[in-house]
Every structure is written in C-alpha cells, then in structure tokens.
Image (tube, rainbow, N blue to C red):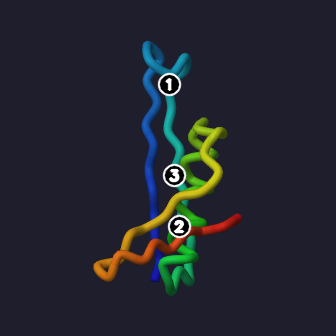
C-alpha cells in the first residue's frame, strides 16, 4: 500500500509558511505504518517523538521501534 501524509504550516503559528508532503510505498503492516508516522511527525518538527503505536482490537500495541 502507498501512504501519504500532508502538513501545512502557518506563519503565525509555525514561524514560516509552507507545506510538507511525505509518501511511502510498500507499507504492508502496522510496524511499517508506525515507522512512517513517526518519521513524518519528526520531519514536521515534532523531533521529541521517538515512536508511535497502534492498539489493536485484542489490546496488543504495535510500535514502529525505530
């Protein structure tokens, strides 16, 4: 699957105006999706984020573990 995430920055809130678009092909599981989301938010300026996870319906959490 191909995934895409867009960020739009505003001069008043972010200090500059512009956008960031990140795409990745071959995201086939939650592990890869969590890695993608982590890298996207880091690229958008949230560099203190170290990992994200998805909680499945059975209660298990899948992290990207970069």
Q: In this view, does 14 lie above or below 34?
A: above
Give coordinates of residue 16: x percent, y percent.
Answer: 55, 21
State left or right for residue 59 relative to residue 46. Answer: left
Residue at horizontal 43 percent and vertical 37 percent from the top = 8
Q: Left or right? Give the position of 8 relative to 51.
A: left
Q: Earlier in the sequence, mark 3 or mark 2?
A: 3
* Location of mark 2 (residue): 34
Q: Do the residues labelled 1 and 3 touch (CB within 8 Å)?
A: no
13 shown above or below 47 = above
How far across and down, in percent of the image, does residue 19 sit?
50, 39
Helix, strand or loop at label 2? It is helix
Q: Name the residue under label 3.
A: 21
Q: Residue 55 or 19: which is nearer the viewer?
A: 55
Which quadrant is the C terminus positioned in? bottom right
Q: Which residue is drawn at 66% across and 67% down?
A: 65
Return the x and y of residue 33 as percentages of the image width and height. Answer: 51, 71
Instruction: Residue at 60%, 66% (x, y): give it.
Output: 35
Percent x, y for residue 32?
Answer: 57, 76
Residue situated in front as seen by the camera: 5 or 65:
65
At horizontal 51% and vertical 52% (from top left) the residue drawn is: 21
Of mark 1 and mark 2, the one earlier in the sequence is 1
Q: Name the element at disc 1.
A: loop
Mark nearest the camera among 3 and 2 is 2
Q: How far apart are marks 3 and 2 (CA)?
A: 17 Å
Q: Residue 17 carries which label?
A: 1
Above/below status of 29 relative to 16: below
Q: What element carries label 3?
A: strand
């Amino acid at each position: 699957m191909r995934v895409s995430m867009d960020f739009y920055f505003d001069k008043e809130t972010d200090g500059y105006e512009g956008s960031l678009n990140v795409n990745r092909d071959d995201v086939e599981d939650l592990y890869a999706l969590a890695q993608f989301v982590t890298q996207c938010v880091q690229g958008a300026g949230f560099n203190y984020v170290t990992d994200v996870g998805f909680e499945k319906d059975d209660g298990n959490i899948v992290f990207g573990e970069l």
